[in-house]
Amino acid sequence: MRIVEQTPDRLVLEIRPVALMVLCVGLFLLFFVLGFGMRLFLPAIAGLMGMSDMGLSALPRAPGMNLLGYASVIPLLVGVFLIKTRRLSFDRPSGKVTVVSRGVLGRNEAAYPLADLQGASLAASRSGNSGTTYRAVMHFSGMTGQVPVTPYSTSGPGPSRTVEAINGWLGPRMTGLSDLTGDQTAAVAAALEKLGVKLPR
């Protein structure tokens, strides 16, 4: 996660999953080479070294090796459909939260009302082998509900840094304001702003 812009009126975050891109490309190449490359490269390398192929040319014809080669398309599809650069823009003057996704298949954009944004939190996902991973989730009031920042969970500090950046820019939320009148709410907001606490509008 990278903070592109941060002012009292505007916050722009960019999430570029470089590590996940490298992992998908690496898995694609590994499965492809193990599945199909052995038949193409190992006998040729053995021939160049003046050795007999020692049955290597027959090994990749086993069904399991071919299936491994065909499985290389799975990380490639994950890379095409799931891995996207996401830019989150929080803009107080326009009152909008904009999420723009760019990937191999094009660009998508979604907008939400900033007034409905209650904050962000971490959502945990646990699997038996890889442990616990996390993703950032934005919470909106009304019909919008929860909006995940990414469709996948990851390890590392990225999701928690995203949550901290969003909540830090929003500032503290006042609880119980629904019980106050308009004049009381304005008085509380004015008192907090005198103390240096800027509340989201």
Image: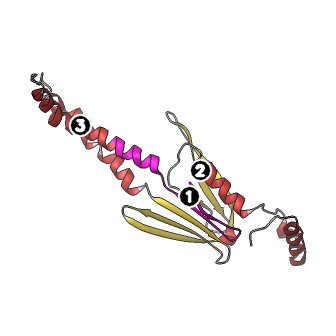
Where residue 139 sits: x, y (%)?
65, 61
Report which residue position mark 3 lands on. Answer: 35
Quadrant (top left, top right, bottom left, bottom right) of the C terminus: bottom right
Q: Are marks 2 and 3 in contact (CB under 8 Å)?
A: no
Could you say which disc has been placed on residue 64 in the image? none
| Secondary structure at numbered mark 2 | helix
| Secondary structure at numbered mark 1 | loop
What separation in Å lies between label 2 and label 3 (alpha carbons)? 35 Å
| Secondary structure at numbered mark 3 | helix
18 drawn magenta: yes
Magenta stretch bounds:
1-27
Q: Residues within 10 Å of mark 2 (few under 14, many from 20)?
A: many
Q: Nearer the viewer, residue 78 or 91?
A: 91
Q: Earlier in the sequence, mark 2 or mark 1?
A: 1
Report which residue position mark 2 lands on. Answer: 159
Report which residue position mark 1 lands on. Answer: 149
Q: Earlier in the sequence, mark 1 or mark 3?
A: 3
Q: Residues within 10 Å of mark 3 (few under 14, many from 20)?
A: many
What separation in Å lies between label 2 and label 1 (alpha carbons)? 9 Å
Q: Nearer the viewer, residue 6 or 166?
A: 6
Where residue 57 sits: x, y (%)?
12, 30
Residue at horizontal 47 percent and vertical 64 percent from the top: 101
Where residue 186 sits: x, y (%)?
86, 75
